[in-house]
Image (cartoon, rainbow, N blue to C red):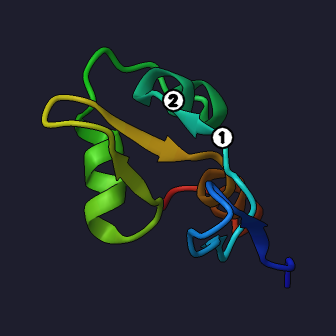
């Protein structure tokens, strides 16, 4: 289990704690490259997120990125079924 990372913005501010180390976020095209898919739309990545196979992070109302750690975990478990 990774240790907590603490960062203080100002001397009197409470420290910000991150429970996990920073994870690289991927576009749906990068997700498909890791999984060996050939798709032009994000439907498959959204489907994998809905099933709970990978973790999505919404950047804004139009942009969704996917966690590299969750994708490598999916590959280690045997890939997509």
At a point 46% along the width and 66% down the height, the residue shown is 53
Pick whichever of labels 2 and 1 is earlier in the sequence: 1
Reading the image, the residue beneath label 2 is 32
Q: Is residue 76 above or below residue 25?
A: below
Towards the viewer: 51 or 69: 69
Residue 34 location, x and y as percent? 65, 33
- In the image, taking residue 57 as reference, residue 50 lies left or right, namely left
Task: Tell me what residue is drawn at x 22 percent, y 36 percent.
Answer: 60
- Identify which residue, 52 or 63, lies in the foreground: 63
The dot on residue 24 is 1
Question: Is 38 displayed left or right of 12 in the figure?
Answer: left
Q: Position of residue 13 (x, y in %)?
A: 56, 68
Q: Are marks 2 and 1 in contact (CB under 8 Å)?
A: no
Q: Residue at x 34, y 58 (%)?
A: 49
**Picture layout, residue 55 above or below residue 27:** below
- State the image coordinates of residue 3 (x, y, percent, origin top left): 86, 79
Task: Identify the image quadrant of the N terminus.
Answer: bottom right
Helix, strand or loop status at disc 1: loop
**Mark 2 and mark 1: Cα distance apart in space:** 15 Å
Counting other residues with Cα less than 10 Å from the Cα at mark 2, is it few (<14), some (14-19), or many (20 or more)?
Answer: some
Question: Which residue reaches farthest front?
Answer: 12
Q: Which residue is nearer to you in this view: 14 or 56?
A: 14
- Crowding at dot 1, Cα within 10 Å, few <14 / some 14-19 / many 20+, comes out as few
């Amino acid at each position: 289990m990774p240790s907590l990372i603490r960062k203080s913005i100002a001397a009197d501010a409470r420290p910000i704690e991150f429970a996990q180390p920073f994870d690289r976020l991927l576009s749906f095209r990068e997700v498909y490259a890791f999984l060996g898919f050939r798709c032009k739309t994000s439907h498959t990545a959204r489907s994998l997120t809905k099933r709970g196979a990978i973790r999505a992070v919404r950047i804004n109302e139009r942009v969704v990125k996917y966690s590299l750690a969750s994708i490598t975990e999916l590959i280690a478990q045997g890939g997509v079924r």
